[in-house]
Structure formats: C-alpha cells, structure tokens
Amino acid sequence: MGSTTSSFSTYETARILVPGYYFAVLTLILVNLTALTVQWPIVVPDVFMIFVFVVLGYIAGLTLYAKESTKRRKAFQENQPSSYLKTKARAIPDLPVMEEDEAKQLYFYILNNHIPSIFHEKIFFFGTIYHIMIQIRRTSLWFSLLGTILAMALPLAGYPDSAGLLSFSAAVWLIYLFNVTFNKADRKMQENYKDQIYWLEMNNDLVETILRKRSQNLSSQRP
C-alpha cells in the first residue's frame, strides 16, 4: 500500500507541475517577445525572474489542477469501469439500483482492495498522461491564439518587427496540432478503462459477491 500511495503522490505532483511550468515557460517567452517587439526591454534581476517563474508555474499548475476540466471531456466520461459496475448491478434482478456516485465509490473500493497493485501503476500512469496532454493541448491553443493576435495587432500599432511573435505562434500551433492530430491521450484513456473492465469481467464472481454484499449492507441499514 505504501508503494501505491507513493506512486499516486508522484503522479498527482506531475499533474500539477508539468502543465503549470509549461504555462509559465510560454508566458515568459511571450512577454519577452512582446517587450522586444515594442522595444521595451525587460530589465529585472535574474533572481527575481527565477522567483516569478517558480511562483507562476506553481500557481498555474494548481489552478489547472483544481479546475478538473479534463474530467468533463467525452474521452474521460465514457466507458468508465464504474459504469460497468452500474450496468452489472442493474442486470441482477434482486439488487437495488446503483447511482453513479455509488458506482464510483464501489469501483475505488475494488481498485484499492482487490485489483493487483501492478494494475495501479498503469492506471495512475495513463491517467496522469491523459491529464497532462490535454492541459498542454489547451494551453497551447490559448497561447497560439494570443501570440497570433499580438503578431497581427502590433504592426498595426506601429511596431513592424513581429517576426519573433510569429515564430513563437507557429511553434505553439504545431504543438497543438500534433497533439490534436494524433490524439493519443484520448485513446490511451479509453484503453486504460478497457483493461480495468476486462479485469472486472474476468473476476465476475468477486464482483457479484461485492455487489450482493453492498445490497445486504443497504438492507441492514434500513429501519
């Protein structure tokens, strides 16, 4: 259990830091290129710049992590193992109807107490990769749009040398387009779900026993 907890903490930390510092890097590059374009060089101590980078990356990472917008995507919502448990309970005539929150709670109980720890590593890893890649995709879109707008607007304001902003925008657009074109994050998330559902199917007796035990517990709690 200790190793699993340690792995979970590592993956959750990566989910905060990688998107956060990607955001921070793009922000500092865009600010510096904009300053060069308008001929207003940023003169600050290196120590202060490092401090800004560290704080910005951490705050951005926590903000993106707290929003949990990646969990609202179709690739995350569809075909979850908890949906399999919900459908399984419905197929057994004498079991009560299971709500979505109950199904998720039961799934995590099975994951933590019955699914082998070797599965946990794969589940945590691909779940983390999914969240990081989607956040990188979205952050790239925001910055590519912002960079393109600045590269087009500043020449109209009398600052013609926007080649740096154009190059920046093109590079970030490429990152975004590669991410969307190959879309490996969504595919891996669905494969991750399928592996877990397959384990549940192969351990059908265990799953049914747990579902019936849940039903008995609910019955015993009724007045």
Image (spheres, rainbow, N blue to C red):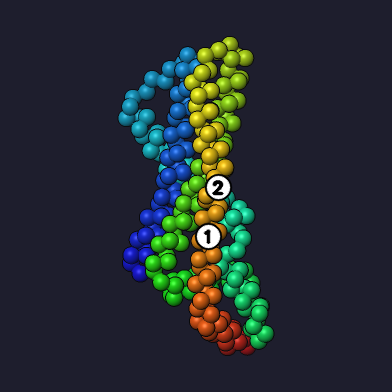
Name the secondary structure under disc 2: loop
Residue type at mark 1 is Glu
Which residue appears at 61% of the width and 76% of the height?
88
The x, y position of residue 193, in whole percent, is 53, 63
Return the disc, 1 or 2, that comes first in the chain's sequence: 2
Residue 67 visible in image: no
Q: Quadrant of the N terminus?
A: bottom left
Find disc 2 in the rendering and name its residue.
183
The x, y position of residue 201, in whole percent, is 54, 75
Q: CA distance from mark 1 to mark 2?
A: 13 Å
Residue 133 visible in image: yes
Residue 62 in the image: above or below residue 200 = above
Residue type at mark 2 is Asn
* Label 1 Cα crowd, 10 Å radius (few <14 / some 14-19 / many 20+): some
Find disc 1 in the rendering and name its residue.
191
Which residue appears at 35% of the width and 29% of the height?
48
